[in-house]
Amino acid sequence: MTASYLRVALVLPPVQSFNMPYSAPAALASLLQERFGAQTLVVDAGVEWLASALRDADPAIAADLGRLRDPSAYRDAFALREAHAHAEAALQALTARWAPETVQLSGEYVPPDRFENWDEVRRSLERPTERMFDGYVRRELIPKLRSFHPQIVGLSVPFDWMLWPTLRLLRFLRRSCPDVVTIVGGPAIQRLWNEGQAEFFDILDADWAAIGDGERALIDLVGWVCRGEEPQDPALVRLPPEAAPKPRPQPAGFYDRGVVPDYSDLDLAAYLRPEPILPIPASEGCYYGRCRFCSRQRRDQAVTFVETPGRQVAEAMRRLQRQLGVTQFVLTGDILTRRFLLGVANDLSMDNAPLNWFCEASFKASMAGRLTEADCERLYAGGCRLILNGLESGSARIRELMDCQVNEAMFRRTLRRLSDAGVVPYVTIVFGYPGETAEDLMATAEFIRTHQETCVFATSRFEIVPGTPLADQLQQDPRVRCTPRSVLEGGWDHDAEDTLGDAAARAILERDLGGMFGRFPQFYRQIPVLMQLLSKTWPRPVPRRPANRRERVRALAQSPSGAGDRLGGGEQWT
């Protein structure tokens, strides 16, 4: 077999997101087409499952989920909150028969049990009980793959909650497509390998695993399938592994190649949005590289920072707009530089109708001070509408413990400059960091209150990532008790004598921030939803810089000022 006859199916198991595709399968498809002339098939099984389930459901359920495709739902925060509440209730009604197995509107899946060990997982997979996704896999996904006749099927697993559906899907593939070579990869798979979870790989019914760089692993696998070449890249592991899993460094990816993901196989109208939003890989690694709690501080995930040139990313947006009519994009990566941001904006600002995009940048260290008023105006003119930044805490003491150094005066100035230019700062905050006191938490609440009119806040309960400097430190501290979750989940819970307890923290947050997030705040964490609310592009307006911050707030919310309508949003303490 020559590579030109190669057929590869790239499948995203249920469920990554109902709002937008995941870039890895589409980017890998583009890479295989470019390098080998391969024929590829990209499948988002989560979105296909939803469409399949709705065909036999009560029409009222489909109608309530369809509210999120209605442009009028995005006219203001109140309308969107109502649409989201109806859609969440509809999805719960759709999946009620499978309880306790369920899936949330965010895409997060809850398996049929909380597994304490891998033997319990194996036994649950072997039971003949019908599970939530089985009907779709048997009636639609497997026939679709068979008709494509792939030699290789690759499964991408970015999140822990996708592990159980992936294990289940692989068993269907083994029975129904026994001659197909299967490979599984993604951050969730890499985490389990680097944590030495050998029993997981014993029950993983795949032929190969990509540990680290999926591009290199897949290229090596193509050489083995097409030419019988023995794999050389350590990222490609034959299963079951001959040696016990152990951490390994992760090489940098192919981000300097400027690969444009191929989303042409996907039904973009099936996602729960009025118009599609597509992710484009833009960087990997972190040039700051100091936050003690971050997974990028693990040896197996610490990679040299690489970034696609801004001009290439801008051209990728234009190409996808020409091919698919898409006008909104998420530039994915751990972090992006000022040079990159301005490069994309400058390139797109030359167009008559700049495309809209969201990205992540760090205002730690000197980055905040380098964004001038002119820079922020150029970002807006070039289509940037939302910038994510992890402040993590409003307490300088906690940020120092995190080694997340921020000059707060410069940080506040940057938030103001972005907001005045029309670019919304999306700020992430964590509560419950080890050592956080009531005073620290109140400082964070005060920071949120001060900026709630101009920033979006996404808040969450802190969890410990094993293998980070923070995790290593806490394991040596007798005052701290770290509790692993089920074997399918990677984070640890913790209790510490010097850390404010859950109940006391919840009381402070309800007292100081009660009502700020409204009745149904969860939608604010979903970037695709927020992007639609920000741009309100139905029909698409001509971009215009708001005259001032107050006008910008009115343009976004368009409803009476009040606690339930402010821009601050996110998931409250859970």
Image (cartoon, rainbow, N blue to C red):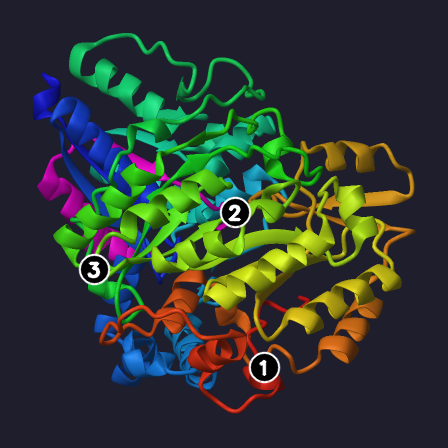
Q: SS at mark 1?
A: loop
Q: Residue at x 76, y 31 (%)?
A: 472
| Above or below, comparing residue 496 to residue 415 in the picture | above
| Above or below, comparing residue 555 to residue 290 in the picture | below
> Residue 354 magenta-drawn?
no
Tell me the kind of residue under disc 1.
Answer: Gly
Q: Which of marks 1 and 3 is nearer the N terminus?
A: 3
**Nearer to me, 61 or 428:** 428
Magenta-colored span? 133-161
Disc 2 designates what residue? 361
Residue 376 x/y as whole percent:
47, 56
Residue 245 x/y as whole percent:
55, 21
Q: In which quarter of the image is residue 468?
A: top right
> Residue 152 magenta-drawn?
yes
**Nearer to me, 383 or 127:** 383
Disc 3 designates what residue? 352
Disc 1 designates what residue? 518
Distance between mark 3 and mark 2 Cα atoms: 26 Å
